Amino acid sequence: MKNQDKEIYRSKKYRLEKDDLLRQIQELNDLVQHLRKDNDNLNMSQKNINLFVIFGLIESITRTENLMGSRK
């Protein structure tokens, strides 16, 4: 019975982590879209800074998605 309880706990824990990661991915995607829209109104040096931030966020999203995939 203890092993079954441990498995249920572990399953719930991973489900909560997955839900949190999915929420974070959505927030990052929303931020990327917002930055892309704002980017249209900026001068060239500001655009370069925003692109750097966008690429960093995309890398974070990719790493998070890969982490989620490795836990399936």
Image (cartoon, helix red, strand yellow):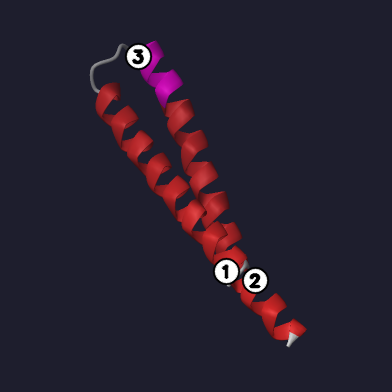
Name the residue that disc number 1 marks.
Answer: 12
* Kind of element beneath mark 3: helix
Q: Which numbered disc flags the more N-terminal residue, 1 or 3?
A: 1
Mark closer to the observer (3, 2):
2
Query: Alpha carbon of mark 1 to alpha carbon of mark 3: how far?
Result: 47 Å
Mark closer to the observer (1, 3):
1
Q: Amino acid at mark 1?
A: Lys
Q: Residue at x 53, y 66 (%)?
A: 15
Q: Amino acid at mark 3?
A: Met
Magenta segment boundaries in residue numbering:
44-50
Task: State the image coordinates of residue 46 (x, y, percent, origin top left).
Answer: 38, 14
Look at the magenta stretch and give its main secondary structure: helix
Query: Alpha carbon of mark 3 to alpha carbon of mark 2: how far?
Result: 51 Å
Q: Is residue 70 above or below residue 60?
A: below
| Contact, mark 1 vs mark 2 (Cβ under 8 Å) | yes
Q: Residue at x 27, y 23 (%)?
A: 38
Q: If the image is split into quadrants, where does the N terminus sit?
A: bottom right
Front residue (pair 66, 68): 68
Q: Residue at x 42, y 27 (%)?
A: 51
Q: Quadrant of residue 47?
A: top left
Indicate which disc residue 46 carries. none
Q: Is residue 9 above or below residue 54?
A: below
Q: Callout 3: 10 Å neighbours few (<14), some, many (20+)?
A: few
Front residue (pair 13, 49): 13
Q: Amino acid at mark 2?
A: Tyr
Q: Which numbered disc flags the more N-terminal residue, 3 or 2?
A: 2
* Kind of element beneath mark 1: helix
Query: Alpha carbon of mark 1 to alpha carbon of mark 2: how far?
Result: 5 Å
Name the residue that disc number 3 marks.
Answer: 44
